[in-house]
């Protein structure tokens, strides 16, 4: 400003707040979705939709890498399902497209010509018909470096916008949010696993099992299907546990749980109760005989097992209750299957017992009555006629006299003169 008060120079300071605003917008939308407890796939779809709104030239995709290594699509709202479904279950590797390679290398991979790049050999025919020729995935990493998945941008053609500074800012913001959402989902799954599944075998615990059996019985009621409820007990498990150790006992339970899982994949539900007992509910196909089903189960479960240096010959006892003839409720069927199990074990190990109504007709035990006789004080005579019993006399035994006590001290023996009456 000069002496006359006129502006002569101006100093302008421009700040690039693009990155800050990108983080603000993306964080707001993603955290809002998480706070509403939306499923993981929906949260990640929100991230993709917001990115595509900020950068219309890209198509965003998010894949998950599971514990065993295969890829699983989580989000990609602008990609057709026919493409995403082809990626489900594909194992990551050094030459598995862009995303599988990025997950394998744990670093971004930019392919600018999908049609000719060797990484896309065997996969290019899936994406080229959709009009995309450029793919740029970035791995989603945990803090410890474990790969959770990939976040990818697809482009229709190579241009200066590919992997630009602006797009790099978008990718950085999105991978952080994706890692947060996926770790949060893993924590929820761990809590659910602890709450509803047996930690040793991975089978549902009693709480989850009851829910699943109720659903199975409801479906059987609609279709008129029969259901066999099996109460399975491992014979001589305590002896094995005591002789070979608890580690061997745990290994045996894990193996039995794994064998049961194999069988219920064909249909049915199973769970573990405390100790060495398992519950299995199996729907029967039309014309299927329950005896043949039980024999197949026993043959599968009773295969010998090698534990450390010992060969264990498996033996199981089974109690069976049938829906609907033996009961229609979860609690009733379990109780009847347990009664059948006790009947089977009474006959020896390795037996199968079927519930029958006769198991409920157990003769009652004689009722033992206790009588307490209160003796009247000395000099009092009672007659049971006073109580309307019809008996004319009461005989009782007087308790033995108490042993003689030591003489009381003289100052206690003579209480002195009695006080005058009031």
Image (cartoon, helix red, strand yellow):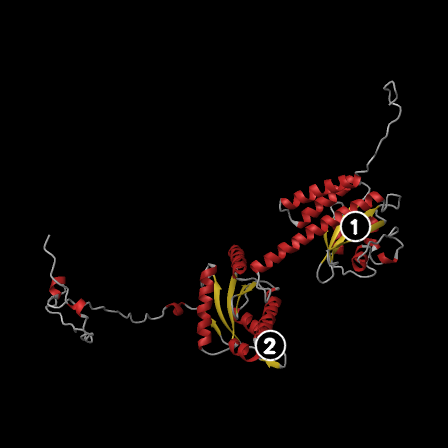
Report the residue marked by disc 1. 152
State the image coordinates of residue 121 (x, y, percent, origin top left).
Answer: 85, 58
Indicate whether 49 appears above or below 245: above
Q: Is residue 331 visible?
A: yes
Q: Is residue 231 left or right of residue 254?
A: left
Report the residue marked by disc 2. 303
In which quadrant of the rendered image does the N terminus lie? top right
Task: Give the distance between the C-alpha atoms of the residues marked 2 and 1, in whole angstroms.
Answer: 48 Å
Q: Badges 2 and 1: C-beta atoms under 8 Å apart? A: no
Indicate whether 117 appears above or below 240: above
Q: Is residue 105 left or right of residue 297?
A: right
Discs 2/1, front: 1
Given residues 399 and 315, the one toward you in this image is 399
Residue at 40% from the left image edge and 69% from the top image edge: 359
State the image coordinates of residue 239 (x, y, percent, origin top left).
Answer: 52, 79
Residue at 45% from the left image edge and 70% from the top image edge: 340
What residue occupies the far front of the structure in this picture? 411
State the image coordinates of residue 47 (x, y, percent, origin top left).
Answer: 72, 45
Q: Could you classify mark 2 by the number of other residues whose Cα lies within 10 Å: few (under 14), some (14-19), or many (20 or more)? A: few
Q: Quadrant of residue 375?
A: bottom left
Q: Is residue 109 left or right of residue 309?
A: right
Indicate whether 87 appears above or below 49: below
Q: Is residue 41 left or right of residue 224?
A: right
Disc with the residue nearer the chain's start (2 vs 1): 1
Residue at 78% from the left image edge and 48% from the top image edge: 172
Disc 2 element? loop
Q: Could you classify mark 1 by the number of other residues whose Cα lies within 10 Å: few (under 14), some (14-19), or many (20 or more)? A: many
Q: Is residue 235 visible?
A: no
Disc 1 element? strand
């Amino acid at each position: 400003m000069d002496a006359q008060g006129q502006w002569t120079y101006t100093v302008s300071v421009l700040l690039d707040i693009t990155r800050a605003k990108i983080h603000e917008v993306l964080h707001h939308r993603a955290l809002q979705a998480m706070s509403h407890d939306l499923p993981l796939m929906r949260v990640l779809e929100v991230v993709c939709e917001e990115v595509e709104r900020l950068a219309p030239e890209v198509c965003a995709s998010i894949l998950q890498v599971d514990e065993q290594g295969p890829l699983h699509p989580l989000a990609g709202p602008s990609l057709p399902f026919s493409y995403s479904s082809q990626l489900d279950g594909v194992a990551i590797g050094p030459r598995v497209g862009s995303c599988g390679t990025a997950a394998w290398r744990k670093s971004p991979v930019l392919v600018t010509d999908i049609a000719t790049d060797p990484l896309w050999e065997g996969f290019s025919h899936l994406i080229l018909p959709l009009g995309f020729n450029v793919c740029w995935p970035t791995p989603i990493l945990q803090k410890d470096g474990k790969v959770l998945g990939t976040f990818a941008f697809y482009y229709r053609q190579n241009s200066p916008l590919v992997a630009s500074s602006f797009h790099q800012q978008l990718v950085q913001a999105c991978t952080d949010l994706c890692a947060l959402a996926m770790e949060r989902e893993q924590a929820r799954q761990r809590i659910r696993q602890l709450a509803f599944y047996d930690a040793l075998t991975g089978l549902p615990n009693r709480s989850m099992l009851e829910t699943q059996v109720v659903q199975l019985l409801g479906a059987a009621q609609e279709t008129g299907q029969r259901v066999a409820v099996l109460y399975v007990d491992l014979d001589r498990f305590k002896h094995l546990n005591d002789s070979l150790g608890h580690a061997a006992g745990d290994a045996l339970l894990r193996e039995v749980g794994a064998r049961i899982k194999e069988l219920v994949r064909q249909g049915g539900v199973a769970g573990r109760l405390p100790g060495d007992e398992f519950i299995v509910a199996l729907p029967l196909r039309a014309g299927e005989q329950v005896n043949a089903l039980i024999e197949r189960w026993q043959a599968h479960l009773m295969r010998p097992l090698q534990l450390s240096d010992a060969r264990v010959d498996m033996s199981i006892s089974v109690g069976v209750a049938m829906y609907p003839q033996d009961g229609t409720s979860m609690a009733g069927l379990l109780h009847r299957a347990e009664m059948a199990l006790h009947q089977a074990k009474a006959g020896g190990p390795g037996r199968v017992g079927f519930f029958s109504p006769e198991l409920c007709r157990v003769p009652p035990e004689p009722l033992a009555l206790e009588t307490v006789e209160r003796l009247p004080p000395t000099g009092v005579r009672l007659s049971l006629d006073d109580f309307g019993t019809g008996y004319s006399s009461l005989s009782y035994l007087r308790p033995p006299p108490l042993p003689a006590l030591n003489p009381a001290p003289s100052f206690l023996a003579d209480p002195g003169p009695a006080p005058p009456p009031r």
